[in-house]
Amino acid sequence: PQQTEDAFPASQQIVVLSESLNATNVQIQSLQEQYHDLERTNRLLVAEVLSLQKMVRAQSQASNELISH
Amino acid sequence: PQQTEDAFPASQQIVVLSESLNATNVQIQSLQEQYHDLERTNRLLVAEVLSLQKMVRAQSQASNELISH
Amino acid sequence: PQQTEDAFPASQQIVVLSESLNATNVQIQSLQEQYHDLERTNRLLVAEVLSLQKMVRAQSQASNELISH
């Protein structure tokens, strides 16, 4: 059992690893939240672009009618 | 070697850590997939916005020509 | 202390876990960078969509004035 009597024993290494993993999980949580914000903005953009397409097509049609008269 | 004879020995702590890390990796995999979906939507949005810009500029030019005649 | 004398002792398991966690952190770093790229594109898209909305509204108003004369 030399390993557990090392200057840096297994138990301490496990504590360090456990803390590192916690920090990693905090980062993932933050990424998940950032992702959801981006997803929300993206959904708004899709709605705005669809609405713009409708407006532009309606204007295009109106212009064509105006020209053909 | 008291540590390995604890109520919660190193070997068990390692199993717990290993399972936690697996769960973390599953979360990252899911985030990666969500990211790729968002990237795909974003690319479609860029294409739609560029197409809208062309249409709006063409309409703007057509209007100006209509007014100047 | 049978565990530390196993074919796959705690110290080696800790090394493997530590390397896995490092690989996980590299993946998170990469996801974070991909996220920032996507956020930048998204901000540009928001600006372009706002600018398109202004142009389309101005054109719509101009068309209405043209028709009413």
Image (tube, coloured by chain):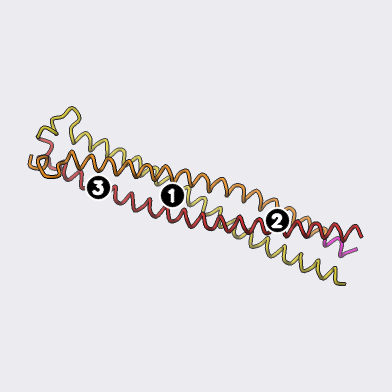
Chain colours: A yellow, B red, C orange
Q: Is residue C66 magenta?
A: yes
Residue at x 14% of width, y 33% of height: A3
Report the side of C19 relative to C1 (left or right). right
Q: Which residue is rendered at x = 53% and y = 45% of the image? A: C37
Which image quarter holds the C terminus of chain A?
bottom right
Magenta-colored span? C63-69
Q: Residue at x 24, y 43 (%)?
A: C16
Give the class, few, some or many, for how many residues have Cα within 10 Å of label 2's Cα (few <14, many ≥20): some
Could you tell me if the residues under marks 2 and 1 are in contact, i.e. CB atoms within 8 Å?
no
- Residue located beneath label 2 in the image: B53
Question: Can you give x and y, in whole percent of width and height, for residue B66 in the image?
Answer: 87, 61
Q: Which mark is residue C60?
A: none
Q: Secondary structure at mark 2?
A: helix
User: Where on the picture, by quarter, is residue A64?
Assistant: bottom right
Disc 3 target residue: B18
* Chain to which mark 2 belongs: B
Q: Which residue is under mark 1?
A: A32
Tell me the distance, in whole angstroms, between the alpha carbons under discs 2 and 1.
33 Å
In magenta stretch: residue C65: yes
Identified at 51% across, 44% down, the residue is C36
What crowding class fits label 3: few (fewer than 14 Cα within 10 Å), some (14-19), or many (20 or more)? many
Q: Determine the CA span between mark 2 and mark 3.
A: 52 Å
